[in-house]
Image (spheres, rainbow, N blue to C red):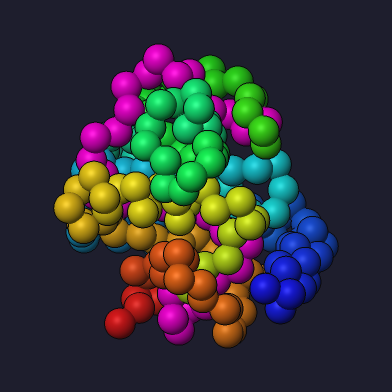
Amino acid sequence: MATKQLLRRQIKRAIKALDYDTIATESHSISQVVRSLIASTHAKRIACYMNMDKGEVTTGEIIKNLFHDGQEVFLPRCTHTSESKHFKLREDHHPHLIFHQMSSLAMVHDLKPQGPYQLKEPEPHIDEATSLDLVLVPGVAFDIKTGARMGHGAGYYDDFFQRYKIVHQGHKPLLVGLCLIEQVTSPIPLEEHDFPMDCIVCGDGTIHWVK
């Protein structure tokens, strides 16, 4: 665990040193690859994320393309089992993600920062996703050889993937990690509850499928 925490700190320091133009350029390359990937997989119901102000692939262009290309778009909200009344994966109440459907790009632009991370999130009354074809996943670091992903440590995404598998009889959507070049590292320690990515799209415009 200590090794994972140290690695997380090291990667975060490297990302913090990146300037805006570098992240913007890499994010644009990723958005182009993601657009082609979605077209080739014929995925229609796509979950994305609203990026933080710093330190991760920006998703504005991706979300714009999704609406332009006619996909159904879902964005996450951080909630808690005590509030959502969703089933618990452990004894105590704990945080988890719910993905809500966005009906238009204008609706996305109207989202307000809220929740523990002050990200732009959907309101609770908006329809929840019942099924998804593909999830675009953020992270702190990725291993392009194994598909291992390291998040910020809260476990939101791994919790969501586990919930999805339980509800959908073991099935899950295609998991696509979005990764700046500076976030590529190896090895990343995997714990039992960690879900590896099916593929990882990098800031240099490459895509890495995990066998």
Q: Is residue 60 magenta?
A: no
**Residue 53: x, y in percent?**
70, 41
The residue under the point 63% across, 62% down is 140
Quadrant in the picture for the N terminus: bottom right
**Relative to 3, 44 lies left or right:** left
**Relative to 138, 16 lies left or right:** right
**Residue 44: x, y in percent?**
21, 43
Q: Relative to residue 124, is residue 205 depicted above or below?
A: below
Instruction: Residue at the far top: name it.
Output: 125
Q: Relative to residue 105, is residue 62 depicted above or below?
A: below
The residue under the point 54% across, 53% down is 155
**Residue 50: x, y in percent?**
54, 39
Q: Relative to residue 90, is residue 186 depicted above or below?
A: below
Principal secondary structure, stretch drawn in magenta: loop
**Relative to 73, 11 lies left or right:** right
**Residue 209: x, y in percent?**
34, 76
**Relative to 87, 194 lies left or right:** right
Which range of residues does the magenta coloring cover?
A: 118-147
The tally of labels here is: 0
Quadrant in the picture for the C terminus: bottom left
Q: Relative to residue 34, is residue 91 depicted above or below?
A: above
Closer to the camera, 136 or 181?
136
Q: Is residue 145 magenta?
A: yes
The residue under the point 20% across, 48% down is 168
Closer to the camera, 168 or 92?
92
**Residue 118 appearing in the image:** yes
The residue under the point 59% across, 43% down is 51
